[in-house]
Image (cartoon, rainbow, N blue to C red):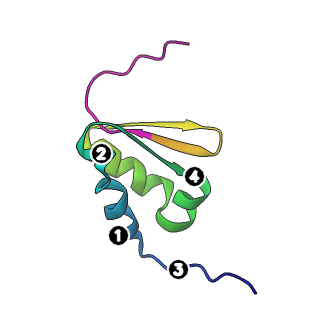
Amino acid sequence: MRALRHYCSADLWLAQIFSAKAVASGGVVRRSVSDVERILGRERLELEIRRRGFHLIEAGDQFIVICNRAPVRLVV
């Protein structure tokens, strides 16, 4: 039997990401690039990240959101 995917609106999906405990504590959340592109769109995610003053990294097939406004320094 084929699993049915639960439909989630872009607004709800975005709200769920930014309501995670990691966001409130200044942590990190990650989402697959394909999910972002399918559900929300890259541009909308980038706009929301900028609006919040967070940082967005694309690494392989994942978007990594650093949920604080502190400067980021890539070490290696």
Q: Secondary structure at mark 1?
A: helix
Q: Residue 52, relative to residue 3: is it above or below? A: above
Q: Amino acid at mark 4?
A: Ser
**Location of residue 62 by image quarter:** top right
Is residue 6 magenta-colored? no
Q: Nearer the viewer, residue 46 or 28?
A: 28
Residue at 51% across / 67% down in the picture? Answer: 39
Q: Residue 10, relative to residue 7: is it above or below? A: above
Labels 4, 3: front one = 3
How crowded is the residue under tag 2: few (<14 C-alpha within 10 Å), some, or many (20+)? Answer: some
Labels 1, 3: front one = 3
Give whichever of discs 1 and 3 has the lower sequence position: 3
The residues tagged by marks 4 and 3 sit, at their Cα atoms, a distance apart of 17 Å
The residues tagged by marks 4 and 1 sit, at their Cα atoms, a distance apart of 17 Å
Give whichever of discs 1 and 2 has the lower sequence position: 1
Q: Are marks 1 and 3 in contact (CB under 8 Å)?
A: no
Look at mark 1 in the image and give the residue it sits on: 11
Q: Amino acid at mark 2?
A: Val
In percent of width and height, residue 27 lies at 33, 37
The boundaries of the magenta stretch are 65-76
Q: Secondary structure at mark 4?
A: strand
Look at mark 3 in the image and give the residue it sits on: 6
Is residue 67 magenta-colored? yes
Q: Amino acid at mark 1?
A: Asp
Q: Which mark is residue 32?
A: 4
Q: Are marks 4 and 1 in contact (CB under 8 Å)?
A: no
Give whichever of discs 3 and 2 has the lower sequence position: 3
